[in-house]
Amino acid sequence: MSTAFAPGKCILFGEHAVVYGHPAVAVSIDSGVEITIEESEDWEINNQYNTDGYEKFNPDKHPHIQHIIRDLFNYEGKPLRINVQSNLFSGAGLGSSAALSNAMGAALHQFTKPGKEIDLIKLSKIGHSAEAATQEGRASPTDSAASSLGGCVVVSGERIDTLEHVFDTSLVTPEGKRSWSIHHAELHENINQSWLVLGFTGQSSPTGKMVSGVAERLKQNHELYEEMKSIENITIAGLTALKAGNLEAVGMAMNSCHEKLKILGVSNELLDLMVSATRSHSFGSKLTGAGGGGCMVALTDNPTRVAQEIELCGGKPLISKFGSSGVYIKKKKNKL
Protein backbone atom coordinates (compact mmCIF):
# COMPACT_ATOMS: atom_id res chain seq x y z
CA MET A 1 0.00 0.00 0.00
CA SER A 2 1.15 3.54 -0.71
CA THR A 3 -0.45 6.94 -0.05
CA ALA A 4 0.50 10.28 -1.59
CA PHE A 5 -0.85 13.82 -1.25
CA ALA A 6 -0.64 16.57 -3.87
CA PRO A 7 -1.88 20.13 -3.28
CA GLY A 8 -4.07 22.17 -5.55
CA LYS A 9 -2.94 25.49 -6.92
CA CYS A 10 -4.06 29.04 -7.49
CA ILE A 11 -2.84 31.15 -10.42
CA LEU A 12 -2.22 34.72 -9.31
CA PHE A 13 -1.22 36.09 -12.72
CA GLY A 14 -0.88 34.92 -16.30
CA GLU A 15 -3.54 32.27 -16.91
CA HIS A 16 -4.23 31.61 -20.62
CA ALA A 17 -1.25 33.78 -21.63
CA VAL A 18 1.08 31.06 -20.26
CA VAL A 19 -0.18 28.63 -22.93
CA TYR A 20 1.50 30.94 -25.47
CA GLY A 21 4.82 31.24 -23.66
CA HIS A 22 4.10 34.29 -21.50
CA PRO A 23 4.91 34.00 -17.77
CA ALA A 24 2.42 32.93 -15.11
CA VAL A 25 2.71 32.95 -11.33
CA ALA A 26 1.06 30.19 -9.32
CA VAL A 27 1.11 29.11 -5.68
CA SER A 28 0.18 25.81 -4.08
CA ILE A 29 -2.71 25.89 -1.61
CA ASP A 30 -3.53 23.94 1.54
CA SER A 31 -6.25 21.77 -0.01
CA GLY A 32 -5.49 18.94 -2.40
CA VAL A 33 -5.88 15.29 -3.40
CA GLU A 34 -4.81 12.19 -1.50
CA ILE A 35 -4.52 8.81 -3.24
CA THR A 36 -3.97 5.42 -1.67
CA ILE A 37 -3.05 2.43 -3.85
CA GLU A 38 -3.15 -1.19 -2.81
CA GLU A 39 -3.29 -4.54 -4.54
CA SER A 40 -6.58 -6.25 -5.31
CA GLU A 41 -6.99 -10.02 -5.72
CA ASP A 42 -10.09 -9.61 -7.87
CA TRP A 43 -8.64 -10.22 -11.34
CA GLU A 44 -12.09 -10.29 -12.94
CA ILE A 45 -12.80 -6.68 -11.95
CA ASN A 46 -9.27 -5.55 -12.82
CA ASN A 47 -8.49 -2.09 -11.42
CA GLN A 48 -10.93 -0.50 -8.98
CA TYR A 49 -11.44 3.19 -8.37
CA ASN A 50 -13.01 4.84 -5.34
CA THR A 51 -14.22 8.25 -4.30
CA ASP A 52 -17.41 7.33 -2.41
CA GLY A 53 -17.41 3.55 -2.94
CA TYR A 54 -15.26 1.17 -4.98
CA GLU A 55 -16.35 0.54 -8.54
CA LYS A 56 -14.74 -0.93 -11.62
CA PHE A 57 -12.19 1.47 -13.06
CA ASN A 58 -13.43 3.21 -16.21
CA PRO A 59 -10.55 4.55 -18.35
CA ASP A 60 -12.89 6.87 -20.27
CA LYS A 61 -14.11 8.45 -17.03
CA HIS A 62 -10.62 8.82 -15.57
CA PRO A 63 -8.24 9.45 -18.51
CA HIS A 64 -5.54 11.03 -16.30
CA ILE A 65 -5.27 7.87 -14.22
CA GLN A 66 -5.33 5.61 -17.28
CA HIS A 67 -2.57 7.60 -18.98
CA ILE A 68 -0.34 7.35 -15.92
CA ILE A 69 -0.93 3.63 -15.29
CA ARG A 70 -0.64 2.41 -18.87
CA ASP A 71 1.25 4.98 -20.93
CA LEU A 72 3.72 6.41 -18.41
CA PHE A 73 4.36 3.57 -15.96
CA ASN A 74 3.44 0.65 -18.24
CA TYR A 75 2.05 -1.04 -15.15
CA GLU A 76 1.21 -4.71 -15.71
CA GLY A 77 1.10 -6.00 -12.14
CA LYS A 78 -1.81 -7.14 -10.01
CA PRO A 79 -5.11 -5.21 -10.19
CA LEU A 80 -5.12 -2.00 -8.16
CA ARG A 81 -7.56 -0.57 -5.66
CA ILE A 82 -7.29 3.20 -6.01
CA ASN A 83 -8.79 5.28 -3.22
CA VAL A 84 -9.16 9.02 -3.89
CA GLN A 85 -9.92 11.69 -1.31
CA SER A 86 -10.12 15.35 -2.34
CA ASN A 87 -11.01 18.56 -0.53
CA LEU A 88 -10.72 20.64 -3.70
CA PHE A 89 -13.72 21.89 -5.65
CA SER A 90 -13.81 19.73 -8.79
CA GLY A 91 -13.57 21.47 -12.17
CA ALA A 92 -13.04 24.79 -10.41
CA GLY A 93 -9.69 25.90 -11.79
CA LEU A 94 -7.77 24.90 -8.67
CA GLY A 95 -5.67 22.29 -10.41
CA SER A 96 -7.66 19.31 -9.15
CA SER A 97 -6.78 17.21 -12.21
CA ALA A 98 -3.07 18.06 -11.88
CA ALA A 99 -3.20 17.26 -8.16
CA LEU A 100 -4.92 13.98 -9.02
CA SER A 101 -2.26 13.17 -11.61
CA ASN A 102 0.62 14.11 -9.30
CA ALA A 103 -0.80 12.18 -6.35
CA MET A 104 -1.38 9.16 -8.59
CA GLY A 105 2.10 9.38 -10.06
CA ALA A 106 3.70 9.68 -6.62
CA ALA A 107 1.61 6.87 -5.13
CA LEU A 108 2.28 4.53 -8.05
CA HIS A 109 5.99 5.35 -7.95
CA GLN A 110 6.12 4.48 -4.26
CA PHE A 111 3.99 1.38 -4.87
CA THR A 112 6.21 0.01 -7.65
CA LYS A 113 9.53 1.26 -6.25
CA PRO A 114 9.11 1.29 -2.46
CA GLY A 115 11.61 3.40 -0.58
CA LYS A 116 13.03 5.06 -3.69
CA GLU A 117 12.98 8.85 -3.50
CA ILE A 118 10.59 10.60 -5.84
CA ASP A 119 12.03 12.99 -8.42
CA LEU A 120 9.63 15.93 -8.16
CA ILE A 121 10.71 17.33 -11.52
CA LYS A 122 10.00 14.02 -13.24
CA LEU A 123 6.71 13.82 -11.36
CA SER A 124 5.78 17.30 -12.58
CA LYS A 125 6.44 16.24 -16.17
CA ILE A 126 4.31 13.12 -15.66
CA GLY A 127 1.46 15.30 -14.42
CA HIS A 128 1.88 17.67 -17.36
CA SER A 129 1.78 14.78 -19.81
CA ALA A 130 -1.45 13.53 -18.26
CA GLU A 131 -2.96 17.02 -18.46
CA ALA A 132 -2.03 17.38 -22.13
CA ALA A 133 -3.39 13.94 -22.98
CA THR A 134 -6.85 15.03 -21.82
CA GLN A 135 -6.82 18.62 -23.12
CA GLU A 136 -6.45 18.07 -26.86
CA GLY A 137 -2.70 18.58 -26.58
CA ARG A 138 -3.04 22.07 -25.05
CA ALA A 139 -1.81 22.39 -21.49
CA SER A 140 0.78 24.51 -19.77
CA PRO A 141 2.89 22.92 -17.01
CA THR A 142 1.68 25.52 -14.49
CA ASP A 143 -0.76 23.35 -12.54
CA SER A 144 1.44 20.27 -12.41
CA ALA A 145 4.57 22.23 -11.46
CA ALA A 146 2.87 24.20 -8.67
CA SER A 147 1.32 21.04 -7.27
CA SER A 148 4.45 18.94 -7.51
CA LEU A 149 7.03 21.48 -6.31
CA GLY A 150 4.87 23.51 -3.91
CA GLY A 151 5.46 27.10 -2.86
CA CYS A 152 5.43 29.78 -5.56
CA VAL A 153 6.38 28.84 -9.12
CA VAL A 154 6.80 30.99 -12.20
CA VAL A 155 6.29 29.39 -15.61
CA SER A 156 7.55 31.22 -18.68
CA GLY A 157 8.40 30.66 -22.33
CA GLU A 158 12.02 31.53 -21.56
CA ARG A 159 14.33 31.54 -18.57
CA ILE A 160 14.10 34.44 -16.16
CA ASP A 161 17.56 35.35 -14.89
CA THR A 162 16.33 36.93 -11.66
CA LEU A 163 14.64 33.72 -10.50
CA GLU A 164 15.85 30.27 -9.47
CA HIS A 165 15.53 28.05 -12.54
CA VAL A 166 14.20 24.54 -11.78
CA PHE A 167 13.67 22.78 -15.12
CA ASP A 168 12.56 23.15 -18.75
CA THR A 169 9.83 21.27 -20.57
CA SER A 170 8.03 21.31 -23.91
CA LEU A 171 4.87 20.06 -25.59
CA VAL A 172 3.69 19.68 -29.17
CA THR A 173 0.27 21.38 -29.42
CA PRO A 174 -2.13 21.86 -32.36
CA GLU A 175 -0.57 25.33 -32.77
CA GLY A 176 2.99 24.01 -32.79
CA LYS A 177 5.69 23.21 -30.26
CA ARG A 178 5.52 25.12 -26.97
CA SER A 179 8.40 25.32 -24.51
CA TRP A 180 8.45 26.53 -20.92
CA SER A 181 10.93 27.19 -18.15
CA ILE A 182 9.83 26.59 -14.57
CA HIS A 183 11.26 28.72 -11.79
CA HIS A 184 10.93 28.97 -8.03
CA ALA A 185 10.20 32.37 -6.48
CA GLU A 186 10.95 33.28 -2.89
CA LEU A 187 8.15 35.29 -1.30
CA HIS A 188 8.72 38.24 1.02
CA GLU A 189 7.83 37.55 4.65
CA ASN A 190 5.08 40.21 4.47
CA ILE A 191 3.12 37.84 2.22
CA ASN A 192 2.66 35.54 5.20
CA GLN A 193 0.48 38.22 6.78
CA SER A 194 -2.17 37.75 4.11
CA TRP A 195 -4.58 35.03 3.02
CA LEU A 196 -5.95 33.73 -0.23
CA VAL A 197 -9.71 33.30 -0.27
CA LEU A 198 -11.03 31.35 -3.23
CA GLY A 199 -14.64 31.61 -4.28
CA PHE A 200 -16.20 28.78 -6.28
CA THR A 201 -19.08 29.70 -8.57
CA GLY A 202 -20.46 26.18 -8.47
CA GLN A 203 -20.06 26.09 -12.24
CA SER A 204 -17.56 23.74 -13.85
CA SER A 205 -14.59 25.30 -15.64
CA PRO A 206 -13.49 22.91 -18.41
CA THR A 207 -9.88 23.89 -19.05
CA GLY A 208 -9.58 22.26 -22.47
CA LYS A 209 -12.73 23.95 -23.74
CA MET A 210 -11.74 27.37 -22.39
CA VAL A 211 -8.20 27.17 -23.79
CA SER A 212 -9.57 26.09 -27.18
CA GLY A 213 -12.05 28.98 -27.08
CA VAL A 214 -9.28 31.51 -26.51
CA ALA A 215 -7.25 29.94 -29.33
CA GLU A 216 -10.20 30.36 -31.70
CA ARG A 217 -10.76 34.00 -30.67
CA LEU A 218 -7.08 34.72 -31.24
CA LYS A 219 -7.37 33.36 -34.78
CA GLN A 220 -10.36 35.58 -35.45
CA ASN A 221 -8.93 38.69 -33.80
CA HIS A 222 -5.15 38.99 -33.88
CA GLU A 223 -5.32 42.18 -31.81
CA LEU A 224 -6.04 39.99 -28.79
CA TYR A 225 -2.39 38.94 -28.85
CA GLU A 226 -1.68 42.43 -27.50
CA GLU A 227 -3.82 41.57 -24.48
CA MET A 228 -1.60 38.54 -23.92
CA LYS A 229 1.41 40.87 -23.90
CA SER A 230 -0.39 43.15 -21.45
CA ILE A 231 -1.02 40.19 -19.15
CA GLU A 232 2.72 39.43 -19.31
CA ASN A 233 3.55 42.98 -18.19
CA ILE A 234 1.02 42.72 -15.35
CA THR A 235 2.47 39.35 -14.32
CA ILE A 236 6.00 40.78 -14.12
CA ALA A 237 4.74 43.72 -12.05
CA GLY A 238 2.82 41.39 -9.75
CA LEU A 239 5.82 39.10 -9.28
CA THR A 240 8.03 42.08 -8.43
CA ALA A 241 5.47 43.15 -5.82
CA LEU A 242 5.33 39.62 -4.35
CA LYS A 243 9.11 39.52 -3.95
CA ALA A 244 9.06 42.97 -2.33
CA GLY A 245 6.16 42.12 -0.01
CA ASN A 246 4.05 44.99 -1.34
CA LEU A 247 0.53 43.62 -0.82
CA GLU A 248 -1.19 46.69 -2.25
CA ALA A 249 0.80 46.44 -5.49
CA VAL A 250 0.09 42.69 -5.71
CA GLY A 251 -3.61 43.47 -5.38
CA MET A 252 -3.46 46.15 -8.09
CA ALA A 253 -1.84 43.66 -10.47
CA MET A 254 -4.53 41.08 -9.67
CA ASN A 255 -7.26 43.62 -10.44
CA SER A 256 -5.64 44.58 -13.73
CA CYS A 257 -5.17 40.95 -14.73
CA HIS A 258 -8.88 40.27 -14.23
CA GLU A 259 -9.82 43.10 -16.59
CA LYS A 260 -7.57 41.66 -19.30
CA LEU A 261 -9.03 38.20 -18.83
CA LYS A 262 -12.49 39.70 -19.28
CA ILE A 263 -11.37 41.06 -22.64
CA LEU A 264 -10.23 37.56 -23.61
CA GLY A 265 -13.79 36.41 -22.90
CA VAL A 266 -13.07 33.95 -20.09
CA SER A 267 -14.92 35.60 -17.20
CA ASN A 268 -18.67 35.42 -16.55
CA GLU A 269 -21.35 37.25 -14.59
CA LEU A 270 -20.97 35.40 -11.29
CA LEU A 271 -17.17 35.62 -11.34
CA ASP A 272 -17.39 39.35 -11.97
CA LEU A 273 -19.94 39.71 -9.17
CA MET A 274 -17.76 37.94 -6.60
CA VAL A 275 -14.66 39.83 -7.72
CA SER A 276 -16.48 43.14 -7.35
CA ALA A 277 -18.03 42.24 -3.98
CA THR A 278 -14.73 41.22 -2.39
CA ARG A 279 -12.51 44.07 -3.56
CA SER A 280 -13.50 46.48 -0.77
CA HIS A 281 -12.21 43.93 1.77
CA SER A 282 -9.17 42.78 -0.20
CA PHE A 283 -5.92 44.04 -1.63
CA GLY A 284 -7.13 42.69 -4.97
CA SER A 285 -9.23 39.96 -6.57
CA LYS A 286 -9.60 38.23 -9.92
CA LEU A 287 -10.74 35.04 -11.58
CA THR A 288 -8.21 32.24 -11.32
CA GLY A 289 -7.70 29.36 -13.71
CA ALA A 290 -9.45 28.74 -16.99
CA GLY A 291 -12.52 30.88 -16.27
CA GLY A 292 -15.99 30.41 -17.70
CA GLY A 293 -17.03 29.43 -14.19
CA GLY A 294 -14.69 27.89 -11.68
CA CYS A 295 -13.12 30.19 -9.07
CA MET A 296 -12.05 33.69 -8.27
CA VAL A 297 -9.38 34.54 -5.71
CA ALA A 298 -8.94 37.45 -3.33
CA LEU A 299 -5.76 38.49 -1.51
CA THR A 300 -6.75 39.79 1.91
CA ASP A 301 -5.90 40.26 5.57
CA ASN A 302 -9.58 39.75 6.48
CA PRO A 303 -10.39 36.25 5.17
CA THR A 304 -13.55 35.80 7.22
CA ARG A 305 -15.21 38.91 5.80
CA VAL A 306 -14.20 38.04 2.24
CA ALA A 307 -15.57 34.51 2.68
CA GLN A 308 -18.87 36.01 3.86
CA GLU A 309 -19.09 38.23 0.77
CA ILE A 310 -18.49 35.24 -1.47
CA GLU A 311 -21.31 33.33 0.25
CA LEU A 312 -23.65 36.31 -0.10
CA CYS A 313 -23.01 36.21 -3.85
CA GLY A 314 -23.94 32.54 -3.94
CA GLY A 315 -20.38 31.20 -4.08
CA LYS A 316 -18.51 28.70 -1.92
CA PRO A 317 -15.39 30.01 -0.15
CA LEU A 318 -12.12 28.21 0.52
CA ILE A 319 -9.44 29.86 2.67
CA SER A 320 -5.74 29.07 2.28
CA LYS A 321 -2.37 30.41 3.28
CA PHE A 322 0.28 31.09 0.65
CA GLY A 323 2.54 28.40 -0.75
CA SER A 324 1.93 25.06 0.95
CA SER A 325 4.34 22.17 0.52
CA GLY A 326 4.33 20.16 -2.68
CA VAL A 327 3.74 16.45 -3.22
CA TYR A 328 4.68 14.09 -0.43
CA ILE A 329 4.33 10.42 0.47
CA LYS A 330 2.31 9.66 3.57
CA LYS A 331 3.56 6.83 5.77
CA LYS A 332 2.45 6.23 9.31
CA LYS A 333 1.04 9.79 9.28
CA ASN A 334 4.50 11.26 8.74
CA LYS A 335 5.71 13.32 5.77
CA LEU A 336 8.77 11.93 4.05
Image: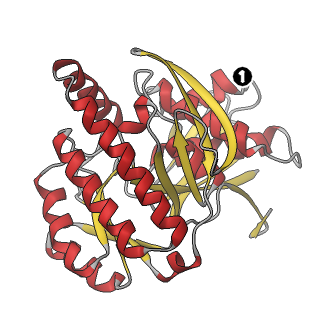
> Percent x, y for residue 210?
27, 34
Outermost residue to the left: 269
Residue at 52% across, 80% down: 190
| 4 sits to left or right of 311 | right
> Percent x, y for residue 156?
52, 39
Residue at 22% across, 58% down: 201
Observer-nearest of 231 and 208: 231
Observer-nearest of 281 and 125: 281
Q: Amino acid at mark 1?
A: Asn
> Percent x, y for residue 229?
33, 37
Visible in this render: residue 314?
Answer: no
Residue that label 1 marks = 74
Secondary element under disc 1, as helix, strand or loop, is loop
Q: Is residue 295 above or below residue 324?
A: above
Visible in this render: residue 196?
Answer: yes
Q: Is residue 106 above or below residue 214?
A: below
Residue at 62% across, 57% down: 150
Outermost residue to the right: 115
